[in-house]
Amino acid sequence: MVNKKNDTYLCWLSHKGIKKSCYKEYLNNILVLNQSKIIDSAVSELKNAFMQAEAGKDVQNIYENEKEIIGHKYIKLCIEKNDKLVNEGYEIKYLMTAEKKECITICASDDKGILYGVFALLRLIEQNFDLKSKEIIENPKKNIRIVNHWDNIDGTVERGFAGNSVLFESCRNKDIMREVMDAIGGITATNKALRKAFNDDYKVADDLERINDYARLLSSVGINGAVINNTNVHQAETYLIDDKINIVKIISEILGRWGVKTYLSINFAAPITLGDLQTSDPLDKDVIKWWNKRAEYVYSEIPELGGFMVKADSEGRPGPFTYGRNHADGANMLASAIAPYGGMLIWRCFVYNCRQDWRDHTIDRAKAAFDCFSPLDGEFPDNVFLQIKNGPMDFQVREPITPLFGAMDKTNKLIEFQITQEYTGQQKHVCFLVPWWKKILSTPTYANNSTDNVEQRINGIAAIVNVGNDENWTGHFLAQANLYGYGRLAWDSNISSEQITEEWIKLTFGNDPLVMKNISRILMNSWETYEKYTSPLGIGWMVSPGHHYGPDVDGYEFSPWGTYHRADCKGIGIDRTLESGTGYAGQYNEPLKSLYNNLETCPDELLLFFHHVHYKYILKSGKTVIQHIYDTHFEGFEMVEKFIDEWKDVEEFIDQNVYIEVIERLNIQLDSCRDWRDQINTYFYRMSGIEDEKGRKIY
Amino acid sequence: MVNKKNDTYLCWLSHKGIKKSCYKEYLNNILVLNQSKIIDSAVSELKNAFMQAEAGKDVQNIYENEKEIIGHKYIKLCIEKNDKLVNEGYEIKYLMTAEKKECITICASDDKGILYGVFALLRLIEQNFDLKSKEIIENPKKNIRIVNHWDNIDGTVERGFAGNSVLFESCRNKDIMREVMDAIGGITATNKALRKAFNDDYKVADDLERINDYARLLSSVGINGAVINNTNVHQAETYLIDDKINIVKIISEILGRWGVKTYLSINFAAPITLGDLQTSDPLDKDVIKWWNKRAEYVYSEIPELGGFMVKADSEGRPGPFTYGRNHADGANMLASAIAPYGGMLIWRCFVYNCRQDWRDHTIDRAKAAFDCFSPLDGEFPDNVFLQIKNGPMDFQVREPITPLFGAMDKTNKLIEFQITQEYTGQQKHVCFLVPWWKKILSTPTYANNSTDNVEQRINGIAAIVNVGNDENWTGHFLAQANLYGYGRLAWDSNISSEQITEEWIKLTFGNDPLVMKNISRILMNSWETYEKYTSPLGIGWMVSPGHHYGPDVDGYEFSPWGTYHRADCKGIGIDRTLESGTGYAGQYNEPLKSLYNNLETCPDELLLFFHHVHYKYILKSGKTVIQHIYDTHFEGFEMVEKFIDEWKDVEEFIDQNVYIEVIERLNIQLDSCRDWRDQINTYFYRMSGIEDEKGRKIY
């Protein structure tokens, strides 16, 4: 069982920093002018913090009326009209009252704003921010800030690297399940059968307090929605909108207290799977009626439900294509069913042919989403949101942005990131993704000849979350920073990576300057380091098939998944140009189109994504492609060695358990990174026959 | 359930051919001069045959005394001293008695000889052999002719490609188990946990009649022993010498009726696993005592048990190395425990380092068995038999012989073949292995400056069997020929491949000349065809890791398994020479040593096993290595197309179900063979940059 007494249990929410804060006595008197469950949560968080500061002491006074206040320092929470605030935004200011009382007020136009304000206040005072120096006004840049769980209701997590689900568990056979899962080494196609094999009853995870703590973590960084079940909806999960709806109700109730709306992944074929109809054709009258009735039922049970998410016609999932319908037909029918209840319909754009013939160089998976969805612009109603992966492939360490962000002006769009490190070291490697996400969000799309970047083109943000039942929530302790950072970016993508890093380190580890220096160096360098020792120059993949961990250069080269490098003895890369390639570059607006299409202007880091070049092609860096490969792979390894040194240097300042956990993972990373370095270098040395200029050891 | 009424159910033992035989009326009168369970079996087989011939009619007369015979034609079975016969041998002759009765006598010096004689007689008359033309005298060349089962007692079969075990099944969860196994796609390390997860009770397979039929099949081709459980002895199977011994008793009883001795794979760590001791050190007094007592117990329960087989210190199995002992220490301790009961101790030589670093070119898995065992020659007692794989690696489509066959004069040796087609198409591809086995057995070893070939150097023969609960026993119907052929070769390795093929086709499909021509062409060409489209020139592997099906050129290239090709842009092959390589060639006796060591004399088909050469190196065939790769891969594909045509041409002569089964598998083979052709050709075209001289399509 997870040790909740542990100082490090609640990640950045330990409130340890309160102890040294000059504002801590304010927490002892709280004036609460409005009532709601969410405001109760806000107050409870202040109490939690005070308890941390005063070694277990409860807050003395909760007031409902300003006149009753006895103490001289207090915090005031109030909902009031304020032109500067949008929903969920907050204002924090220090003021001296007429009676010479000192007050910190948190104002907002709704209770969620109060909650976010409380978390912000705690975050600020734990970092020694001088509240008297200025007023804080914060509005979220986007209203939709959600996480996606790929959790199955048997408690397993697809692409989960931090243990089983925090939300679900199966009632029986848990030990067996875990053992089998461990033995199999993750969740693969296999598990469909396994899940069926272990088809017992499922339920909400026993540890409701942990679900509550999880909701606190999400809320504390401004996340306001969670799709609670796997986008691949299997047989059992289909019943979440049927006789298993109580599971959803319980989770929804807990998350809701913290302002986190619950969304459900649904099975497009549910009318068939649940045994009611012979078809799921979205234009069939009975199907429409069925979904209308089902939506009515679901919302009668859970009025606050955020909506549904659908992965259709992708990787074996059912969808409208089965019936000769398009994705607007599919999405709109469902959207219409939930619209009366304010429901949102999230429709994923991860649609491509996963049975491609590697021999055929004209098919290009990267083109699929744009080809499928852009013709449908204008056909979706207001409550449909297309969820689009950041890149056209699948969460590689480097990809260009998905061209759809620069298109579909008349369609609501969400960006989809992946916090869980499927392709970025699986929480065995440290890989802080915030700099990468910021880069993506700030990439200009040139839509309608504007300079609008991705962030400006989207209505919200979503990401597959990285948490599980491991004691530290994220498997790798440092991977907590990705969840923290995701939330902070979702709230405001203008916050710098450096600020996020600094916040997270201070809240998690305290204020020691060496800790700050070393851990921020590790985090800030980790993504580019991971890129250095894995696949080069935007080519992607080169991972072991199935589980996606560790190098296998040709692992997907002759597979049907559409993910190739096309290396031969002369060169490497996918030609996606308009003239001689697949034409994918043409999906971008100018000048991006020309930038990528043109070998001379294409940025180094995406060169092999767009062009097939000779190993001796000279990069903008001045190096040849092959020398770049060798150099980055040696450098990446050396960087990880440095991470280890830097981590060792802070041992005395870090909780011993956390120190050990992280050093163990860093050593695993070093081993794995050595494999990457040597396999990639050897592969390309053997292939090209070109010597390393620096004469280093290539096997 | 298997349809036993089906005409094709019992493979080559249908006795269909009897109907047209001029000798069939002899079967109606059988004179039996001796009694034993095995002779009962022999008589029952004659009855079975008669029943086939006469549409269900029973044999009319069984006599125990020659004088009582009423009919004019009869068969006589008698044990008698005969200088021309060794144990298990038989004589078949036709004679006219003084009373003008016509008699076919089967004489032998023991009851097993009678049984083999009966099977031989039936085989001969079903093929229209003229018994009057000559006497038949047949003695087995080897006394030890066994099959190895890699069956686990939960009913799964490691590297089994014909369904679950015919011998074992688990009592519960059978459907689940099958489903999970199917989903996982075979038996891997995973299954250790799965087996534990499903740790129910196990038992002998329900269908005892099928076990009996299986024993008939083995016996009919002269196989006289079966190791009934997997060489990798897991937790549950360890109890076969403990509280699960009844399972062994039942199987042993059934097999025994047909002259097939039962052997058990045992766990070297059984004293620990069974919870009795803290050590399995073979020199520890308590361990010795433990095994003595255990042997006493096992033999008191099953006096006819053939003995034990051990895989020690290999691929994670426990062994004497754990205690700083050598393999003679381990084997001899066990051999001594079972010697008093006439038990045989089979000790596998498949010992190598499976955690090798691919970067280190000096370690050579091929050398391991010789290095480990040859120093121990003379240290093993008479009842120890070293079981040595045919080649130094692991049942690849082409390997040189294991050098141990040319060494260890003072040690009993068995050769180990693999009938189950782990690396030769997994019973989805047709691959008739008899020509390959014959080639191995006839390879000279030059031991002690003699010309002794492998067959002359061994004391017996063993093979991992290819049967399972698929209705046709072997998955691919044509794979029955491998089991048939293995038995026939084990009896007498001088029988030609052509004769074995002809026998099997006649007994299985009848005497139609087109059937004979086409199926024998398919069979006789199938092994070399498989070689053509898979890994070239003796290099081996290039299979998908884990399940070992389908191409993956680099699948094992960066793995710890010691199985590499070392291809780069210039050339390919493993240098195993004495001068510049691993020195493996030095393990052979002269002139084999020089033959292989010398680039100029090394046969083409093993070139890359012994030498690293340039792609433009010219083979003895006159082709370059790269052109050979291209040509053979195109040829192999065309051959499979031909097999399909040849099979289609015999449709009208073949049982419809069998026809369809085989055509389906041939089509699967064609698809897979296209994958092989294109992946191998593309890989080497990309790598070498050298064009195909004939300008064919390489992707």
Image: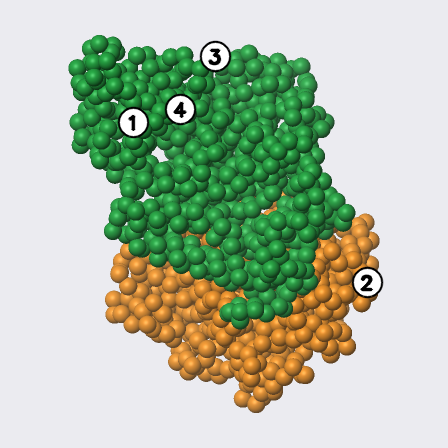
Chain colours: A orange, B green
Q: Where is residue A250 in the image (x, y as percent from the top left)?
A: 45, 53
- The residue marked by circle 4 belongs to what chain? B
Q: Which of marks 1 and 2 is in front?
A: 1
Q: Mark 4 points at which residue?
A: B137
Q: Nearer the viewer, mark 1 or mark 3?
A: 1
- CA gap, disc 1 and disc 2: 80 Å
Q: Where is residue B121 in the image (x, y as percent from the top left)?
A: 32, 27
Q: Earlier in the sequence, mark 1 or mark 4?
A: 1
- Quadrant where the C terminus of chain A lies? bottom right
- The residue marked by circle 1 belongs to what chain? B
The image quadrant that residue B621 belongs to is: bottom right
Give the crowd class for mark 4: few <14, some 14-19, many >=20 residues within 10 Å: some
Which residue is pictured at 54% across the width and 88% down the height? A448
| Label annotation for residue B132 | 1
| Label annotation for residue B300 | 3
Q: Is mark 2 on a helix, strand or loop?
A: loop
Q: Do the residues labelled 3 and 4 touch (CB within 8 Å)?
A: no
* Residue ranking furthest to the bottom: A449
Q: Which of A252 and A609 is in front in this view?
A: A609
Which residue is pictured at 74% across the width and 73% down the height? A624
Q: Do the residues labelled 3 and 2 touch (CB within 8 Å)?
A: no
Which residue is pictured at 62% across the width and 33% down the height? B451
Q: What residue type is labelled 2?
A: Gly
Q: Can residue A251 be seen in this view?
A: no
- CA gap, disc 3 and disc 2: 69 Å
Q: Mark 2 points at which residue?
A: A695
Q: What residue type is labelled 1?
A: Lys
